[in-house]
Image: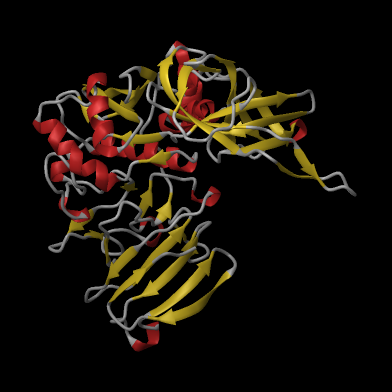
């Protein structure tokens, strides 16, 4: 088999496997109790977990936590509906990162809620937005006046709402349900009770690496943080870029600041511009650990959300000797430098490391056609979302064919193809002329294949694709 090499975590071959979360336990603070969840099992066996919107006799409607979209299903097409669903079961079904992302999105929506002016005195303006809406001392509020709807005179269709900005406020005191503010703008429009008020600052999160309690960063903790980040971005939450976070984490560690300490959140927020910090630690118990994750307010140091989940530590490796960079402990090296494939991949095949940082999967040399070597991603939901991947294939003398694509990635002997897969079949340029050297074919299981090009070099990069 040819060498496969990548320095990116998005390297994707044939897709199979599972996440490392198991036997999950989730604890959530009372301050952010969430709406009711449900689990739906369709007739095809697909499992969906979401926030209940309506559970009627003949249909069920819910917000799907994986796709972040509203779904309505006829109960005639549903095998099972479990409602209410407790958080332990929800985490086992879709993982802790998805649950955290959903809960944080709910908090963000509370922050986006508009309030109103409740009372006006010569010195103070009282507004109906408080701590539950994310308001803090010093926050800026915009005041709007609703002057009515604009409708099409013929059809009655709503075209717009006239809602000009009339003032700016600065918060001077905050309670749970209301705030006191003072006028901070030069706009001279007199305020009225009932004028609409909105918080100006968006919710910005910094997601820290989830380290073991002794401070070590492993592939398990790094992957957990990355999955949380991905879930937040997909939920529409603004997240501090990793490059910005990497520049400030060494300073905090050098000062012996424990990122799990809520008191350090304010320092991190000041350095990154974040309003909230996601941080945590893993308490290791041999091959099983517990990941404790918290959402901390930068302004107050308050723990807004707390969650925990069991994680498998059986394949845990320190990042410093693995395939990625630890911003605190130094740079990592390439994919093939560790003793195992990176945490986002799995394989049933033996493989060898190469001198330039790649991995060489053992193929026909060691296995029959039925058991030839394959590498899979641990994530399996690629058919439900858009994605990009890049694979570098480097052929050496004596190599034959490399397959890159979607599906099981294992041979179906009766059909001489990869079962239930769509993939590129890449012929080594060094193959004999009668074996179509350098030809690249698109193969769809039981639907035939077609040539789509020819390699001009023993080294080729594929991606983005599909």
In which quadrant of the rendered view does residue 246 lie?
top left
Task: Say whether residue 79 is left or right of residue 422.
Answer: right
Q: Nearer the viewer, residue 351 or 36?
A: 36
- The image shows a total of numbered marks equal to 0
Residue at x-position 21% and y-position 36%: 218
| Residue at 36% across, 31% down | 275
**Which residue extends farthest bottom?**
433
- Image vertical order of residue 427 relative to residue 147, above or below: below
- Please say whether residue 90 is visible from this viewpoint: yes
x%, y% of residue 193?
A: 63, 19
Against 435, residue 345 (above or below) is above
Q: Position of residue 10 (x, y in %)?
A: 35, 53
Tell which residue pokes out farthest to the right in this image: 154
- Give above or below for 453 relative to 304: below
Identified at 26% across, 64% down, the residue is: 365
Q: Residue at x 47, y 12 (%)?
A: 176
Residue 168 drawn at (x, y percent) = 49, 32
């Amino acid at each position: 088999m040819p060498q496969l090499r990548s320095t990116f975590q998005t390297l994707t071959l044939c897709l199979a496997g599972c996440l490392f979360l198991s036997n999950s336990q989730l604890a959530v603070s009372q301050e952010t109790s969430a709406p009711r969840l449900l689990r739906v099992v369709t007739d095809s066996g697909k499992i969906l977990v979401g926030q209940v919107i309506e559970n009627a006799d003949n249909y069920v409607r819910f917000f799907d936590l994986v796709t972040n979209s509203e779904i309505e299903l006829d109960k005639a097409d549903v095998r099972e509906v479990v409602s209410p669903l407790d958080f332990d079961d929800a985490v086992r079904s879709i993982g802790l990162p998805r649950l955290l992302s959903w809960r944080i999105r709910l908090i963000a929506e509370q922050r986006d809620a508009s309030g109103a002016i409740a009372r006006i005195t010569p010195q103070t303006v009282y507004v109906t937005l408080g701590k539950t809406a994310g308001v803090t001392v010093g926050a800026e509020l915009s005041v709007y006046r609703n002057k009515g709807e604009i409708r099409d005179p013929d059809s009655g269709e709503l075209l717009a709402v006239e809602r000009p900005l009339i003032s700016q406020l600065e918060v001077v005191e905050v309670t749970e349900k209301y705030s006191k503010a003072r006028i901070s703008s030069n706009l001279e429009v007199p305020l009225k009770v009932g004028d609409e008020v909105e918080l100006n600052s968006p919710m910005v999160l910094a997601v820290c690496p989830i380290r073991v309690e002794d401070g070590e960063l492993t592939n398990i903790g790094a992957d957990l943080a990355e999955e949380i980040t991905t879930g937040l971005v997909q939920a529409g939450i603004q997240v501090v870029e990793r490059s910005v976070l990497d520049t400030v984490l060494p300073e905090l560690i050098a000062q012996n600041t424990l990122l799990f300490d809520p008191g350090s959140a304010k320092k991190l927020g000041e350095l990154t511009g974040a309003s909230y910090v996601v941080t945590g630690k893993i308490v290791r118990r041999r091959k099983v650990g517990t990941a404790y994750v918290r959402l901390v307010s930068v302004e107050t140091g308050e723990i807004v959300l707390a969650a925990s989940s069991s994680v498998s530590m059986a394949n845990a490796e320190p990042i410093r000797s693995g395939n990625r960079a630890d911003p605190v402990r130094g740079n990592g090296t390439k994919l093939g430098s560790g003793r195992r494939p990176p945490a986002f991949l799995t394989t049933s095949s033996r493989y060898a490391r190469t001198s330039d940082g790649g991995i060489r999967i053992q193929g026909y040399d060691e296995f029959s056609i039925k058991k030839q070597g394959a590498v899979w991603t641990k994530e399996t939901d690629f058919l439900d979302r858009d994605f990009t991947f890049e694979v570098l294939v480097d052929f050496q003398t004596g190599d034959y064919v490399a397959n890159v694509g979607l599906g099981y990635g294992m041979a179906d002997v009766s059909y001489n193809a990869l079962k239930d897969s769509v993939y590129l079949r890449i012929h080594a340029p060094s193959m004999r002329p009668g074996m179509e050297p350098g030809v690249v074919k698109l193969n769809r299981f039981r639907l035939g294949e077609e040539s789509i090009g020819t390699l001009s070099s023993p080294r080729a990069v594929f991606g983005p694709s599909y």
